[in-house]
Amino acid sequence: MSLLKEKLAAILPEQVSSIKQFVAENGSKVVSEVTLAQAYGGMRGVKGLVCDTSEVPPQKGLIIRGFELSQLTDKLPEEILFLLLTGVLPSPAELKDLQNDLKEREEVPEYVWNVIDSMPESSHPMTYFNTAILVMQNESKFAKKYEEGINKSDYWVYTLEDALDIIAKVPAIAAYIYRKKFNKGARIESNKNFDWGKNYVHMLGFEDKEDKFANLMRLYLTVHTDHEGGNVSAFSAGTINSALSDLYYSLSGGLNGLAGPLHGLANQECLGWVLETMESFGGVPTEEQIEKMTWDTLNAGQVIPGYGHAVLRVTDPRFTAFHNFGKAHCANDPVFQTVDRVFKVVPEVLKQVEKIQNPWPNVDAGSGSLLYHFGLKEFSYYTVLFSVSRSIGIAAQSVIARAYGLPITRPKSLPTSKFKDLVSK
Ligand code: HAX
């Protein structure tokens, strides 16, 4: 048994029984109320979901198992996976064991390459990626065991198996999609000596002798892993998984949500907006020029991608992590300089638009300029990078949900006529 599985097997029973007792003793206590505006407003702020892997306090931003993001930016994504699942960072031996386990699971079934090869070349990289995950459903150990008839208490064990199988394979799949879609040449085999992030850079086909791009990739993959349970991708995946659809079904479904421009696709849109601004003004724009471009976009009835958030009310610490990396490694890059200047101007403009709750940058505002700096310029690919990382968080949330025995998700909807009745009472 792997050290990760051993640890989970040791800690989960105690956690599950303490949650059962907590709910039994306090089940009737009111923890949240719902206003009419919330019912029509995407359930914003309604506290009706459990997520123990991470939380997002509006005034602070992402906290993973008690660690603020700034305490985790030097960690590998594999360490974050261990942390999300167990609540503690791995020891060196536990990390090595997890990395070896992932290496053993990384071979991608041949039919996945064939399916990717047979898709229309015009398909978006996210369509390739989510299709590849879905077609691998054929491999689900959870689905096979479920069909055989397993005990509910073992659901988490086979969800973990699926989780590790998927996480091991996604870098190679994502890298091949990049190489195929953008005519970069043949598929590159994995290097068993590299960690998960560095291996991804290697399979994408980038020369990276000093590990500079690998360091950005490790940071990128660490930062995007998890963002509590209510965001579109995690919530959708969790809902699908709650029906005991296995992780292949649920991850693919959740990542289809990440492909939306108000969610993960914002990173591709954001760099597009920055480059368009640079092109309009022939180089790094002045603050006045950025202000004009911002108002032009708003007046055209469009959003400024990379700014605003449904939960956050401060600068996203994930943006800060990328901004700091950019200042340290890309300070002279004109695209990064533009992002830096946009950060000075856009919040001041958005503060003047009364309806906007949060004028500050989110995770997507700066990362594209760093990828661009290292030569990954095909920005329709950026959401795939996000997805590779988010697979970790979604997988961890599903393992925990199955261990807790959470039931099928089923909130109540009402027609407008019933809400009118409720309001008039
Ligand atoms: N530019 C222009 N208008 C904005 C805006 C922005 N950056 N952010 C919010 N608004 C508008 C909303 O569109 C909404 O307008 P309507 O009432 O006319 O529909 C109004 O301000 C109120 O919105 P809000 O309450 O402040 O924000 P929401 O919770 O409704 O939406 C969004 C949050 C992230 C979707 C929103 O801020 C947005 O569209 N931002 C730009 C897209 C983006 O960066 N998305 C990525 C978010 C992070 C993420 O999930 N990454 O994966």
Image (cartoon, helix red, strand yellow):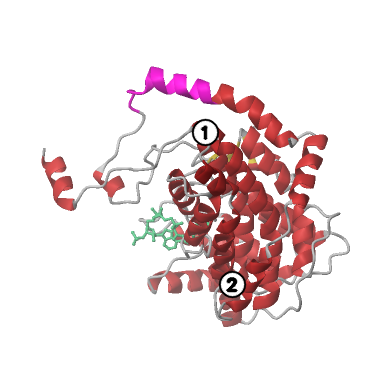
Give how far across and how far down residue 37 sits, in percent: 27, 47
Pair 2/1: label in front: 1
- Of residues 170 and 111, the one drawn nearer to the viewer in this rendering: 111
Q: What residue type is disc 1 on?
A: Asn
* Res 187 → quadrant: bottom right
The picture places residue 346, in percent across and down from the top left corner, at 52, 62
184 vs 339, nearest the viewer: 184
The residue sitting at 60% across, 38% down in the picture is 157
Instruction: Name the residue rendered at 67%, 37% in the picture.
Output: 83
Quadrant position of ligand 1 = bottom left
Label 1 C-beta lies within 8 Å of the nearest ligand 1 atom: no
Classified by dominant secondary structure, the portion drawn in magenta counts as helix
Q: Is residue 123 visible?
A: yes
Q: Where 117 falls versus 226 (above or below)?
A: below
Residue 61 visible here: no
Q: Residue furthest front?
A: 148
Q: Is mark 2 within 8 Å of ligand 1?
A: no
Residue 225 percent across, percent down from the top left: 61, 49
Residue topped by disc 2: 380
The Cα–Cα distance between marks 2 and 1, rounded to whole angstroms, is: 43 Å
Residue at 69% x, 57% y is 169
Q: Which residue is mark 1?
A: 151
Question: What amino acid is found at the position of numbered circle 2 in the picture?
Answer: Ser
